[in-house]
Amino acid sequence: MQGMSQLESLSVALIGGGNMARGIIGGLLGKGASASSISVAEPLEASRQSLVRDFGVRVTADNADAVRGAQVVVLAVKPQLMSGVARALAPALRESRPLVISVAAGIRADRLQHWLGDGIPVVRSMPNRPALIGAGASGLYADASVPAASRSLAERVLASTGLTVWVSAEDQIDAVTALSGSGPAYFFRLAELMAEAGTALGLDADVARQLAAQTLAGAGQLVAAEKAPDLARMRAEVTSKGGTTEAALNTFAAQGFEQLVAAAMVAAERRSRELAAQFGD
């Protein structure tokens, strides 16, 4: 109840009005935050209108206007835009010194602090797309200079969108990006391929898509229903010896599925580090 009342009175500004921002806005409103206390800076007029229509929040095209008086500022812009956005915001943020949460892939906390100026607490987070429906997973990182109260506040904001976990080293945010940040697309692609294979086996294409999508959704709900999901056990429970599932899983293994997944994760993690090098000047 205490967290709820704190969200009700919390002033939040979001720079960028894309999917991640929308997920956070929806989560905050669902947990008791007031639409009148949320400001969003978004350059596109159509997107601003959509934010007002869907959430009733205050919108502006002016980043500095959005952050004025905010206790929390969420930087939800693309990595290639972050340096310019942060540097331009620095004068406004130095006046009030709010908590800054970045959800941009690859941009390190020390670069953000350099652009924004000393004394502004920065928390890095990597949410994912299911935050849009309150089913997200967010990894968070803050260095030793960020006080406990700011960490707690960042956790409350991100927890409104789903699961939150802290990592002890900033490099681990790159791994979070590869696992849960990019992860929903991996499952969507697998379901897409399953639907295509079902069509090739004779199913109507629409029927195959419906079955693949519901199978994906149902499997996720089964995992979500477990207090401490044991994925290996759950897999074993639906894999009868000598049955159809075992035949499929054995084919996955024979085709190098485990190595392919590991390689894909490494590629995503590497790209996250490359973004830091490319746009962290």
Image (cartoon, helix red, strand yellow):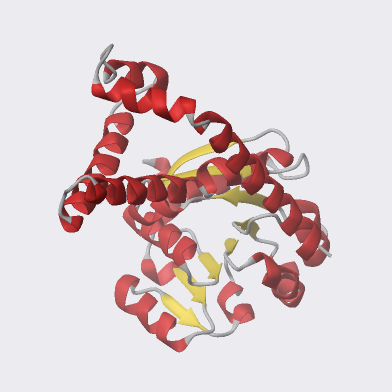
Q: Residue at x 17, y 48 (%)?
A: 202
Front-most of 81 and 185? 185
Residue 227: x percent and y percent? 35, 23
Near-viewer residue (267 or 58): 267
* Viewer can see residue 209: yes
Task: Please give the name of the residue rendered at 20% of the width and 50% of the height, measured from the top-left corner.
Answer: 208
Q: Quadrant of the C terminus?
A: bottom right
Q: In the picture shown, does residue 235 fall above or below 131?
A: above
In the rendered image of this protein, does residue 136 appear above or below residue 23?
above
Which percent across, then down, holds residue 47?
Answer: 42, 80
Q: State how many labels appear.
A: 0
Query: Quick one: quadrant of the N terminus?
Result: top left
Query: Which residue of the protein is positioned furthest toward the bottom in this rendering?
Result: 45
Tell me if 189 is positioned left or right of 244 in this view.
right
Q: Is residue 258 left or right of residue 122?
A: left
Whether residue 113 appears in this view of the structure is no
Front in this rendered view, residue 73 or 140: 140
The image position of residue 279, as x and y in percent, is 76, 65
- 81 horizontally vs 30: left or right: right
Task: Name the side, left or right, on which 47 lies relative to 71.
Answer: left
Q: Position of residue 204 (x, y in %)?
A: 15, 54
Residue at horizontal 18 percent and vertical 57 percent from the top: 206
Q: Residue at x 57, y 49 (%)?
A: 126
In which quarter of the view is residue 97 placed? Answer: bottom right
